[in-house]
Image (tube, rainbow, N blue to C red):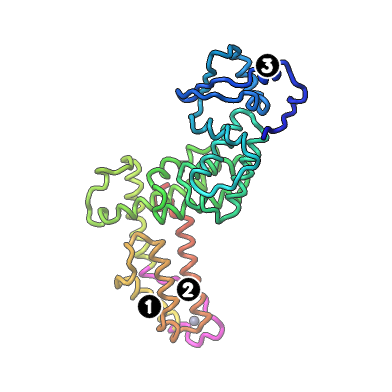
Amino acid sequence: MTLPHPSITKSSPTHRKCIGLKYRTFVVDSTLRRVNVAVLCENSAVFRRIVSENADPDTPIVLHGSTTRQFGNLLWGLEVNSMPQPRDEGDLERILDVEELSRHYSMYHLQVRAESALLAAIAEGTNPAILACNTHALVRMLRITMRVHNETLFSFLMQLWTWRLHSRELDHALAIRMAHPSCWDYDPQPFLKLLGHAFYAAMVVMEPKLSRGQHIDLDSQLTRAEIVHVRCGYHSLRSWWDQIASKAPAYMHCPRCMNPERCSYVWRIRIQWLAENDKIPFPKVDGIRRLQELHRLLAADSFLIKNMPETCRHSALQELLKRKEHLLKTVHHHFDL
Ligand SMILES: [Zn+2]
């Protein structure tokens, strides 16, 4: 399919020249490719200019700034009737290539089609290609959501990046480089938070060595400065956990609580017992997972169920969740960011 372009109907001399030549050889990334140049010219003023500047039909046109794959994907985008929803990594990369290169060559209609397909796939929230994408694709999609000012989709992708760092599906060292606020012409706050989670993920990986006092800079992908941040976070989160363990979160007692003092005491000793007796199978510095596990254990704890009024128990558990939420929002402070 060829897309309508306002200038087609005008049929400028340059355009007629393009159509007349039909096929030309392009050199992209040192690879030769015969291309129906009329299709490119119909859709792009930039290509019309490039072709008119390279009038000799026997001399290949050298295109700079794109790879063979990207150029091939652009030609694919021009051929397909509708942009399919990405179903895997390859599909996603193809549509991202089309979006970026069509923007580069001012192919407005094609760019809008690719952009819409990508935004719809992200908005779906369950698209397998988006949920399993690599860091580079995530960064490329983030740039699109920022360009179209879609805060909701931007936040969704940032959250996806954060959780996939914690589950170790995405590389923390790459995130530490690519999420640095200096790389983005944008509000630094969301990127600082993401950077905090990337350092947190790095710290969890290095924890066995850190806890034994071993060197972590040997064979590390991180720079010395980055390792200093990891160490900061490690020490800060250790003392943060000690505080949680020694001082159970306070909560509001319900009007029916007959003995608030005893109620609080029961809550406190149970938290201390769980926190101090190695009942939580995560390192001390992994406060996010520890709080999650602590909440799970306390929510099912029969001693608390028996000895605390239901509403008090619920409020107390909520306070624990608030601690976790607060840690998630402020994790970057621990790493001195
Ligand atoms: Zn109570």
Label 2 or label 1, whichever comes before in sequence order: 1
Q: Nearer the viewer, residue 86 or 168?
A: 86
Q: What's the amino acid at mark 3?
A: Lys
Q: Position of residue 329 (x, y in %)?
A: 49, 56
Mark 3, other Cα within 10 Å: few <14 / some 14–19 / many ≥20 = some
- The kind of secondary structure element at disc 2 is helix
Name the residue that disc number 2 marks: 317
- Residue 253: say if magenta: yes
Q: Given this view, does label 3 or label 1 mark the residue nearer the observer?
A: 3
* Residue 151 in view of the camera: yes
For the point 49% across and 24% down, the residue is 28
Label 2 or label 3, whichever comes before in sequence order: 3
Left or right for 108, reference 235: right
Q: Nearer the viewer, residue 307 or 198?
A: 198
Q: Compared to 51, does 170 lie above or below?
A: below
Q: Nearer the viewer, residue 77 or 105?
A: 77
Tell me the quarter of the picture where residue 97 sits.
top right
- Residue 64: say if magenta: no
Name the residue that disc number 1 marks: 270
Q: Position of residue 147 (x, y in %)?
A: 61, 39
Name the residue that disc number 3 marks: 17
Report the quarter where the N terminus lies: top right
Q: Which residue range is magenta in the image?
A: 245-262
Separation (CA) of disc 2 from disc 1: 12 Å
Q: Position of residue 10 (x, y in %)?
A: 77, 22
Mark 2, other Cα within 10 Å: few <14 / some 14–19 / many ≥20 = some
For the point 36% across and 47% down, the residue is 229
- The kind of secondary structure element at disc 3 is helix
